[in-house]
Image (cartoon, rainbow, N blue to C red):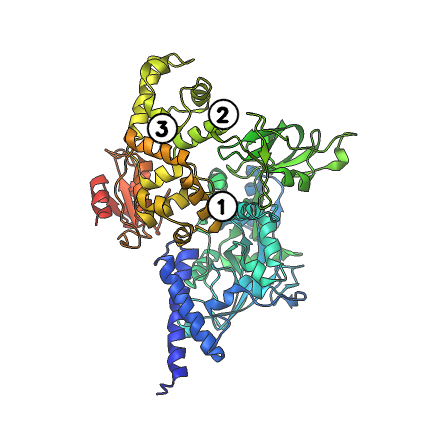
């Protein structure tokens, strides 16, 4: 046996590639990371070093090849072995859409009314870019866009940068198809889209228009290194050419097989019977649509049997056995009646368009954010303009574009005010920011009010009853200036406020008292440190373990925390360097705010790190939000629904269908005391 250094390196490289690929699949496809980021980075750096020392061993399916190669002068053309045909879109977005499709299928199959219902595979219609992935002997060798259906553009280098797409399929080499072409959709999730744009705005760079354009533009980016910086995802939904593989008997079986090969397949799919099954799926996804982390514009129905698909065949360039059933449009035209300025808790001035009411995405929209002055200039939005308004799920409505051809004569461009519209303080805009800010700080009533609302919000200290109107009164009457003042409020002060009965005042004081028992992560988040969101606050709490350690941390040690870069680290250091902020923190501690002691992650790795929990029913001694915070503080994840990915169900009183489903799937079930015991292990 050859035991030369090269042979030894090749063996180690093979082990590292397999292990990194396994962790990539767990993280990007299953959403269940198996090791800390630091351990993953260690494996990756070792692989990079070995490949640098032995360049002859570098292979196209190595995880190191995801970072992008040299810029391309242009995309090469790829002719599809099997055409990438579009499917018919059902014009009627109501029930008739499903009924029409089922009727056509039954007619083509010459089925009588007394014949059994047709079995369909129902799935989502993703709003992204269609891609064909070609695997040969299990290795990704080519990726191409749909193009005109007959041929598309080769985008292999860019697709390699998408972490959830395996460079090598799972399974023994002998069991893998000689050729497997996988059809699917590259998309950008809404959270990834928002995070990317927020980062771009902070850096003063161009933002993406919407998730779909972001996905398409990233894949058709000539420089793969730029594409690698874009947060893209992928779902497989069908096949192109195959060789050396026994096809399953059904479309649902194909999707299951693709998932077994390690390809990401959306979990929101079902096999249904007849038109009633199609309608039920359409209705269920319509209810889920707003909570999905990615955009869809409808659902897709396919005859499940591949044999029946072959019998039905094609009509010109469309399969008879599939149809897209869309939902009502989520874009609409309306008019900008005014542009007003809102002042946030960090002093950021946000222009908001007041719109002529328009029904879009299931609700009546009257306001839309314009983000900042640069965004207004880029979209050229003016008072009186006719604009396209877009709403997706629970995302704040936005103006997609203005239509200058409908603009009234002599409409002036919008100009940001030179002084804060609330307190009159000067407005500043630094060179490295696109956001203008009020310099008034807590002198500005708007910033005080927003800071208090943030402090009392559900994900922070969760002070029930402390809403907008009450905060307005507390600040305007000078009863509260900082969060610490909330813990000095007395009953006789509250009952004198407008619309504050004694019972409401007592309830508020009780809620304020309950908020004293919290977690370190919630307390950090409640402080309202600029650029520190809920996830970053949890990461800081886990990393440092105590407020004292966080207060002493410098920028260098802060950047060791996951997701904390130089900008966030500078914001944290600046916040804790302000005597006023330190004074408020000390007053809050004196008022009795407290939290359980945590061990820093550098010293302790929880037994539940990476485990997925679902909470149901009423727990005896804590709210679900408190239980969620504790689980996440120990490195666990909390999901809203039970699935095969669920590790534990925490059940309280009046647990319902989630408990039944957990039992059916064999998920471990805990009560509150068992959860606390697990957390302390």
Q: Is 445 on the left or on the right of 656, as rendered?
A: right
Which residue has dot 3 on it? Answer: 484
Indicate left or right for 116 with 654 as reference. right
Residues under numbered marks 3 and 1 in contact, where contact means CB atoms less than 8 Å apart: no
Question: Closer to the N terminus: mark 3 or mark 1?
Answer: 1
Quadrant hosting residue 370 = top right
The residue that label 1 is drawn on is 191
Q: Secondary structure at mark 2?
A: helix
Asked if marks 1 and 2 touch (Cβ < 8 Å), the reply is: no
> Which callout, 1 or 2, points at the residue further toward the start of the chain?
1
Picture disc at residue 340? none
Label 3 to label 1, Cα distance in Å? Answer: 33 Å
Q: Position of residue 2 (x, y in %)?
A: 37, 87
Q: Residues within 10 Å of mark 1 (few under 14, many from 20)?
A: some
Q: Is residue 167 above or below residue 668?
A: below
Q: Secondary structure at mark 3?
A: helix
């Amino acid at each position: 046996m050859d035991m030369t250094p090269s042979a030894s390196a090749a063996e180690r490289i093979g082990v590292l590639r397999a292990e990194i690929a396994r962790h990539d699949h767990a993280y990007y496809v299953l959403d269940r990371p198996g090791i800390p980021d630091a351990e993953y980075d260690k494996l990756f750096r070792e692989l990079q070093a070995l490949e640098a020392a032995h360049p002859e061993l570098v292979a196209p399916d190595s995880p190191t090849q995801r970072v992008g190669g040299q810029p391309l002068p242009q995309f090469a053309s790829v002719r599809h072995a099997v055409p990438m045909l579009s499917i018919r879109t059902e014009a009627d977005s109501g029930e008739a859409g499903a009924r029409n499709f089922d009727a056509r299928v039954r007619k083509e199959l010459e089925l009588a009314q007394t014949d059994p219902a047709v079995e369909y595979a129902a799935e989502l219609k993703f709003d992204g870019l269609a891609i064909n992935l070609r695997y040969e002997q299990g290795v990704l060798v080519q990726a191409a866009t749909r193009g005109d259906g007959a041929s598309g553009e080769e985008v292999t280098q860019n697709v390699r940068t998408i972490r959830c797409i395996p460079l090598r399929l799972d399974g023994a080499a002998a069991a893998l198809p000689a050729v497997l072409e996988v059809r699917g959709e590259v998309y950008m999730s809404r959270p990834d889209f928002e995070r990317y744009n927020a980062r771009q705005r902070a850096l003063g760079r161009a933002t993406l228009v919407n998730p779909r354009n972001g996905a398409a533009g990233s894949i058709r980016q000539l420089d793969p290194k730029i594409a690698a910086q874009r947060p893209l995802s992928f779902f497989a939904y069908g096949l192109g050419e195959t060789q050396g593989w026994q096809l399953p008997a059904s479309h649902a079986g194909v999707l299951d097989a693709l998932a077994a090969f390690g390809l990401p397949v959306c979990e929101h799919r079902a096999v249904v019977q007849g038109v009633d099954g199609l309608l039920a799926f359409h209705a269920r996804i319509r209810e889920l649509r707003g909570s999905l982390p990615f955009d869809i514009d409808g659902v897709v129905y396919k005859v499940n049997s591949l044999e029946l698909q072959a019998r039905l065949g094609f009509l010109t360039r469309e399969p008879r056995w599939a149809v897209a059933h869309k939902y009502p449009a989520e874009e609409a035209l309306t008019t900008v009646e005014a542009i007003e300025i809102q002042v946030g808790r960090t002093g950021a001035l946000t222009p908001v368009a007041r719109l002529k009411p328009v029904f879009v995405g299931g609700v009546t929209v009257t306001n839309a954010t314009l983000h900042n002055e640069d965004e207004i200039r880029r979209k050229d939005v003016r008072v009186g303009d006719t604009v396209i308004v877009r709403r997706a799920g629970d995302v704040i409505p936005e103006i997609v574009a203005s239509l200058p051809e409908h603009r009234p004569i002599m409409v002036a461009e919008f100009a940001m005010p030179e002084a804060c519209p609330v307190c009159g303080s000067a407005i500043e805009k630094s060179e490295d920011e696109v956001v203008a800010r009020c310099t008034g700080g807590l002198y500005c009533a708007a910033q005080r009010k927003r800071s208090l609302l943030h402090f009392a919000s559900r994900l922070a200290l969760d002070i029930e009853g402390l809403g907008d109107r009450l905060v307005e009164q507390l600040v305007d009457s000078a009863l509260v200036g900082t969060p610490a003042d909330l813990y000095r409020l007395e009953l006789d002060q509250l009952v004198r406020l407008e619309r504050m009965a004694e019972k409401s005042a007592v309830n508020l004081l009780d809620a304020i008292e309950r908020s004293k028992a919290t977690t370190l992560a919630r307390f950090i988040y409640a402080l309202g440190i600029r650029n520190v969101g809920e996830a970053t606050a949890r990461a800081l709490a886990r990393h440092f373990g105590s407020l004292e350690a966080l207060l002493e941390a410098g920028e260098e040690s802060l950047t060791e925390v996951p997701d904390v870069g130089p900008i966030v680290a500078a914001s944290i250091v600046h916040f804790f360097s302000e005597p006023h902020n330190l004074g408020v923190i000390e007053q809050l501690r004196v008022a009795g705010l407290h939290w359980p002691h945590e061990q820093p992650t550098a010293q302790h790795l929880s037994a539940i790190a990476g485990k997925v929990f679902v909470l149901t029913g009423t727990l005896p001694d804590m709210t679900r939000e408190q239980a969620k915070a504790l689980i996440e503080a120990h490195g666990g994840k909390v999901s809203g629904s039970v699935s095969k990915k669920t590790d534990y169900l925490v059940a309280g009183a009046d647990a319902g269908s989630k408990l039944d489903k957990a039992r059916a799937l064999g998920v471990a079930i805990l009560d509150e005391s068992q959860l606390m015991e697990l957390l302390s292990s």
